[in-house]
Image (cartoon, rainbow, N blue to C red):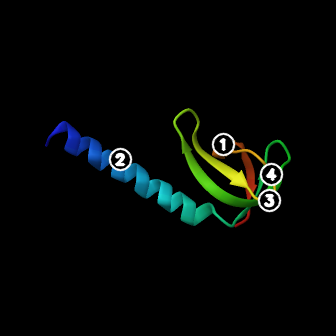
Amino acid sequence: MSASSNGDKRAMNILRELDAAEQELVGRTVVLTGGKAGTIDDVFLDDEHGLRISIRGHEGRWPISTVNHIES
């Protein structure tokens, strides 16, 4: 297996996981540790912080680690 082939497989796995996270999280209501609350509008991959979310009606993107509660 070549290095580029191995890298391609890893990249595809990352994209699959990002897509799965989007499908699972977008549209769900969350409360962040800082008190912000709302509906998840989008999911992003940040090379510095990993998975981040945006919340409808609030400017900015927050690390998924700041989610205190998510509707089940």
Looking at the image, do the residues carrying marks 1 and 2 touch, with CB atoms under 8 Å apart? no
Decide which of tag 2 and tag 3 comes sooner along the chain. Answer: 2
Labels 1, 3: front one: 3
SS at badge 2: helix
Residue bearing the label numbered 4: 58
Where residue 52 appears, as percent x and y from the top left, is: 62, 46
Q: Label 3, on which residue?
A: 38
Work out how far the residue at label 4 is from the one at label 2, CA to CA, in angstroms: 30 Å
User: Label 1 is placed on what type of residue?
Assistant: Ser
Residue tagged by mark 2?
A: 11
Q: Left or right of 49: which side holds 31?
A: right
Q: How crowded is mark 2: few (under 14 residues within 10 Å), some or many (20 or more)?
A: few
Amino acid carrying label 4: it is His
Marked residue nearer the N-terminal end (1 or 2): 2
Which tag is nearer the camera, tag 1 or tag 2? 2
Taking the view exactly as shown, the residue that stands out farthest to the top is: 48
Q: Around disc 3, counting alpha carbons within 10 Å, would you say few (fewer than 14), some (14 to 19), or many (20 or more)?
A: some
Q: Are circles 3 and 4 on residues that touch, CB within 8 Å?
A: yes
The nearer-to-camera label among 3 and 4 is 4
> Horizontal placement of 24 versus 57: left or right?
left
